[in-house]
Image (cartoon, rainbow, N blue to C red):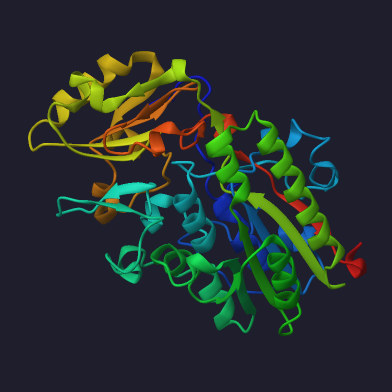
């Protein structure tokens, strides 16, 4: 099935977020396994030749188009070189999907974290992957080995430096197991923690995560003074990381998705539309990437209703059509039921909120999750230690 104009299919195994850690680990000499996908499609082995230490900083919400549009607020980011050009986030373009895609080096259809909120098959409930502890068991829900596990087994010192609140969470165990977890309590602590971790072992792979830019965008919008000020703080953080690199280290800066401002005129409250609730058993996903689970026998009627009501505001397809499109990569059969019977991905600046069930999430200024270039395009920027320049 062809996608609407303005939508893209993430090129898994070629130039996506899934390809960053496998390529970085391969550059460090790790024999990576990724289910038949190329181990170094970004050719980082050549790009970081001589490096014994690689740091990957993921800035939540740092879309490539947003970076390019703000050279004054982000001079360091705009001055950094890129070894491969722009990458693509996975589908849906949302944080938990992206973080597990990064950590496993696999498309969502292989690792199974297929949305911000997904149904738990066989149970009348959903799982919010950000508020996830140990039910379902993270090692069963996401059973694929991570790149960190493979690198640690090859003798690489692996460390994740991320907020203390995420230590031990289900998402952390799904995405980062195999690495030591070093809690960061502030941007300065993140910088110091990544620098310290880079100096451990003969080879080191360090991953850092910062969420404040994404939070600012959601609450204030990406066309806001607050967001631009926060981008400047991120730019300074990257500058500090680059300045303190060990001589034989490389810093890679990337993101999990971009973001789209959503005005009041392009919001539709799903719960207030009778045509969108009849026959619906569970509503999952998020405002720009909805998964609709139908009552038994109602899937065709629900699909027809969502297509009629949403019209050109969304790409509305059946689960089978979405899977066949390739937007999730190859989807393992046992994971497919985590995707809705109906998939609705927003076009333009539309968002499909659910005010009654999620009042706070329905009040945000900006969202992501769909397949527009503003959401999918993410940077891969590089800075090198002195010995590698």
- The relative height of residue 101 versus residue 352 in the rendered view (above or below) is below
Position of residue 313 in the picture relative to residue 210 (left or right): left
Q: Residue at x 42, y 67 (%)?
A: 169
- Quadrant of the image occupied by residue 68: top right
Residue 287 appears in the figure: no
Position of residue 252 in the picture relative to residue 282 (left or right): right
Q: Residue furthest left?
A: 297
Report the front residue among 359 and 52. 359
What percent of the width, then of the height, locates residue 172? 46, 66
Q: Residue at x 54, y 69 (%)?
A: 164
What percent of the width, then of the height, locates residue 375? 55, 35
- The relative height of residue 144 versus residue 276 in the rendered view (above or below) is below
Position of residue 17 in the picture relative to residue 50 (left or right): left
Look at the image and tell me in which quarter the C terminus lies: bottom right
- Quadrant of the image occupied by residue 85: top right
Look at the image and tell me in which quarter the N terminus lies: top left
- The relative height of residue 348 versus residue 227 in the rendered view (above or below) is above
What percent of the width, then of the height, locates residue 237? 76, 56
What percent of the width, then of the height, locates residue 183? 58, 72
Number of marks in picture: 0
- The relative height of residue 375 versus residue 197 in the rendered view (above or below) is above
Q: Residue at x 31, y 31 (%)?
A: 355
Position of residue 125 in the picture relative to residue 162 (left or right): left
Report the front residue among 108 and 239. 239
Report the front residue among 98 and 329. 98
Q: Residue at x 14, y 54 (%)?
A: 122
Residue 189 appears in the figure: yes
């Amino acid at each position: 099935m062809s996608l609407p104009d303005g939508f893209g299919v993430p090129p898994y195994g070629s130039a996506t977020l899934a390809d960053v850690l496998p390529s970085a680990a391969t550059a460090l000499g790790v024999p990576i396994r990724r289910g038949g996908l190329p181990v170094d499609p970004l050719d980082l082995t050549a790009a970081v030749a001589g490096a014994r230490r690689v740091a990957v900083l993921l800035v939540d919400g740092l879309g490539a188009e947003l970076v390019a549009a703000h050279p004054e607020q982000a001079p360091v980011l705009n001055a950094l070189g890129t070894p491969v050009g722009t990458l693509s986030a996975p589908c849906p373009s949302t944080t938990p999907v992206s973080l597990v895609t990064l950590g496993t080096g696999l498309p969502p259809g292989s690792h199974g974290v297929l949305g911000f909120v997904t149904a738990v098959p066989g149970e009348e409930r959903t799982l919010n992957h950000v508020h996830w502890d140990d039910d379902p068991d993270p090692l069963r829900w996401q059973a694929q080995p991570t790149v960190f596990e493979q690198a640690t087994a090859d003798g690489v010192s692996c460390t994740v430096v991320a907020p203390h609140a995420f230590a031990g969470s289900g998402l952390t165990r799904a995405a980062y197991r195999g690495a030591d977890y070093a809690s960061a309590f502030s941007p300065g602590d993140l910088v110091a923690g990544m620098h310290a971790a880079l100096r451990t072992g003969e080879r080191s792979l360090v991953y850092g995560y910062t969420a404040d830019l994404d939070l600012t965008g959601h609450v204030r919008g990406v066309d806001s003074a607050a967001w631009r000020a926060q981008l400047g703080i991120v730019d300074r953080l990257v500058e500090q990381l680059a300045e303190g690199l060990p001589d034989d280290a490389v810093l890679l800066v990337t993101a999990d998705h971009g973001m789209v401002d959503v005005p009041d005129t392009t919001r539709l409250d799903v719960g207030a539309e009778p045509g969108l609730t009849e026959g619906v058993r569970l509503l999952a996903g998020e405002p720009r990437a909805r998964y609709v689970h139908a009552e038994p026998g109602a899937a065709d009627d629900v699909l027809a209703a969502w297509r009629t009501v949403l019209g050109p505001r969304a790409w509305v397809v059946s689960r089978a059509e979405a899977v066949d499109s390739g937007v999730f990569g190859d989807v393992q059969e046992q994971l497919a039921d985590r995707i809705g019977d109906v998939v609705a991905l927003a076009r333009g600046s539309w968002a499909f909120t659910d005010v009654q069930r999620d009042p706070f999430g329905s009040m945000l200024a900006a969202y992501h999750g769909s397949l527009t270039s503003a959401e999918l395009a993410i940077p891969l920027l590089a800075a090198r230690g002195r010995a590698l320049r």
